[in-house]
Image (cartoon, grey):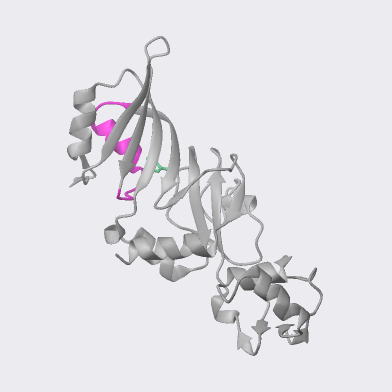
Amino acid sequence: MERLQKIIAGSGYCSRRKAEELIIRGEVFVNGEKITDLGSKASYSDQITVSGHNLKLENKEYILLYKPRGVITTTSDEKGRKTVMDLVETTNRLYPVGRLDYDTSGLLLLTNDGNLTNLLIHPRSNIEKVYVAKIEGIIKPELIKKMCAGVFIDGKKTAKAKAIIKKIDKKKNISLVELTIHEGKNHQVKKMFEAIGYKVIKLKREKFGSLDLHGLKSGESRHLTIKEVKTLYSIVKK
Ligand code: URA
């Protein structure tokens, strides 16, 4: 449940302040009932009418989740493991946009906007994804270069990628590498490193298109703003 003015503003109909004015003026109905109290709450599945306009078609929800490790990216799990849906509060049927492995943490988008989901996961969407991978061993720059030029995984060559070596810890025998890719093949990052002879021991997705994890702790989530949704649409429609 969310404040009515927040849902109206979130639908893109008008600003939150304007929505408050409309509520006070008696222009807003929830499931046919006039609501004039600014403290009223509603859910995204309610039928909301504003000045005679039905907001039902705008009933889209977009949640950015900082997925922790040890959580599965499905809506339900037959083995009873914790899923990403257990971490967000919603009355809608949301679906993850792509997937992060059970042991991968980071940015995951959940939405019921099938149109945007299809655009985002389409191989030609070219959405940039930034990962930070902890690698076993001391990474060799020439091998990183080779990986970024394209390596074969499951018989197909990966597209060009960018990588920055963030840290090398000789004592612990680990390296931290930031990898930017535009594809979304299964276990892509792990397989790319595997192709050059390294094992990923920890993986986190830090960015997805125009979105990052700024302000969120592991396990936390927030709704996207209208502006963020519009920006995502503008990226995939280019
Ligand atoms: N690449 C992987 O190997 N795993 C993920 O979860 C995401 C990208």
Residue 92 is situated, as x and y percent measured from the top left of the image, at 61, 67
Q: Is residue 236 magenta?
A: no
**Residue drawn at 60 percent across, 80 percent down:** 55
Ligand 1 positioned in quadrant: top left
Residue 208 is situated, as x and y percent measured from the top left of the image, at 42, 49
**Residue drawn at 72 percent across, 85 percent down:** 27
Q: Is residue 191 magenta?
A: yes
Regarding residue 78, the answer to whether it shows in the image is no
Q: Which residue is nearer to you in this view: 217 or 81?
A: 217
**Residue drawn at 23 percent across, 24 percent down:** 141
Magenta residues (range)? 182-198
Q: Is residue 73 above or below residue 132?
A: below
Q: Which residue is nearer to you in this view: 197 or 97?
A: 97
Position of 191 compared to 52: left or right?
A: left
Position of 40 compared to 57: left or right?
A: right
Q: Is residue 172 above or below residue 146?
A: above
Q: Which residue is nearer to you in this view: 50 or 142?
A: 50
Question: Hey, which quadrant is residue 7 in on the image?
Answer: bottom right
Q: Is residue 62 above or below residue 194?
A: below
The total of numbered circles placed on residues is 0
**Residue drawn at 49 percent across, 42 percent down:** 106
Q: Is residue 55 above or below residue 234?
A: below
Residue 219 is situated, as x and y percent measured from the top left of the image, at 61, 43
Residue 21 is situated, as x and y percent measured from the top left of the image, at 72, 77
